[in-house]
Image (cartoon, rainbow, N blue to C red):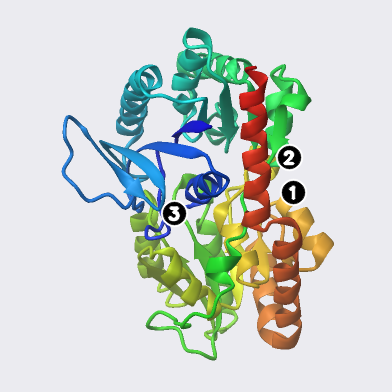
Amino acid sequence: MKVLYFHQHFSTPKGSAGIRSYEMARRLVARGHAVTMVCGSYGGGETGLSGEFVNGRRRGMVDGIDIIEMNLAYSNSDGFAKRAMTFLRFAWRSVALAFTEPYDVLFATTTPLTAGIPGIFARWLRRKPFVFEVRDLWPELPKAMGVITNPLVLWAMSVLEWLSYRSATRCIGLSPGIVDGIAKRGVDRNRIALVPNGCDLGIFGSTVEAWRPEGIAMDDLMAVFAGTQGKANGLDAVLNAAVELKRRGRADIKLLLIGQGALKPALQARAVAENLDNVVFHPPVNKARLAGLMAATDVGMQILANVPAFYYGTSPNKFFDYLASGLPVLNNYPGWLAELIERHGCGFAVPPDDPVAFANALEVAAADKVALKAMGQRSLALARSDFDRAQLSERFVDWLELAKDDAK
């Protein structure tokens, strides 16, 4: 079958963004299917295309994937209005492709929620199967965070959410809470599959050259947060823990924030103002370089703002990168990931907004490196048994093949 795949923030492993769509597309190709990937130009992403844009887009084959990249630059540092306009422009151009490209199944993945718009048109006007993948529950999450407060905008997003779910032949949720959220909108659970983010064992499990940034000694305990530094991530929690660790005189525990995002300048300014020399910032790196960093890391930090909608409604890439790297994970909010950590003994689940408990966990980690290594081994075992990307991508392809069969 031929799949028309929409992911605005697509990246190959050469970029610093998540590679779920790349791996899923590669698995489709390996199973004999043709994939056309439609994306924008995402900050931190790398599509693999380098030619000139003609009439607002460029096209080419990358690792067996036919990629159409639109000249629509996007960054997490953009303001809300600019991001919203970029989302709408991408959706509008995507609708045109949904009417002109040949395909058997249209697949679209969030974020943003507007990703579902071409699928709606394809389902009802071209009678094509449409599979909708939900990575975050919108508008629940932005509403809970206070990012969007305009009642008219929230109403329009709620309508689009309902229409996307109900138009989809089948849906995919990336966490148990997302699956529940889709079902609450009236979608039969038999039409929803749970396919969480996965562990790229071929990248993080391979032999790589370990490295640490300047300012972090090899005998320091290094705890790493590798991801977006935005409002949702609540990274002041890391700086609050750094204050507590500095008060205790623990100069041997370093906290590394690697990535980019709208709040990074403010976090850096705070670290300077409070003389938090135990916090180190580093620009984003590609997956191969990240694997080398993880090989030298002691603890992976899974941090989010204390928003109840996050507890079961997210599936963060970084968490699975930590597992694949065989790292203990320090998680600072309740929910399904904290439950996994506690059930499998592969890290520390601390209460939200509690810098003392956060610092205590890091001191425990620094005090017993043997126990820490055992936690990491249990992380890797969990990665292999439950979250191996190779296995999850097979489930993904099976689901799309069933969607094609639905049209018969």
| Amino acid type indicated by mark 2 | Pro
For the residues carrying marks 2 and 3, which lies nearer the camera in this image?
A: 2
Q: Where is residue 163, by image quadrant?
A: top right
Q: Is residue 385 above or below residue 58?
A: below
Residue located beneath label 2 in the image:
176
x, y (%) of residue 329? Answer: 66, 66
Q: Considering the numbered disc 2 on the image, is that residue within a helix, a strand or a loop?
A: helix
Residue at 42 percent of width and 77 percent of height: 277
Pointer 2 with pointer 1, Cβ within 8 A: yes
| Amino acid type indicated by mark 1 | Trp
Q: Considering the numbered disc 1 on the image, is that residue within a helix, a strand or a loop?
A: helix
Going from the N terminus, do you reach mark 2 or mark 1 first? 2
Q: Residues within 10 Å of mark 2 (few under 14, many from 20)?
A: some
Residue at 73 percent of width and 76 percent of height: 377
Q: Residues within 10 Å of mark 1 (few under 14, many from 20)?
A: some
User: As drawn, which residue projects farthest toward the front?
Assistant: 32
Q: Of residues 359 and 349, which is closer to you in this image?
A: 349
For the residues carrying marks 2 and 1, which lies nearer the camera in this image?
A: 2
User: As drawn, which residue projects farthest toward the top?
Assistant: 125
Q: Which mark is residue 288?
A: none
Q: Residues within 10 Å of mark 3 (few under 14, many from 20)?
A: many
Q: Considering the numbered disc 3 on the image, is that residue within a helix, a strand or a loop?
A: loop
x, y (%) of residue 319? Answer: 61, 58
Residue located beneath label 3 in the image:
229
Q: Is residue 393 above or below residue 401?
A: below
x, y (%) of residue 390? Answer: 63, 56
Going from the N terminus, do you reach mark 3 or mark 1 first? 3
Residue located beneath label 1 in the image:
336
For the C terminus, the quadrant is top right
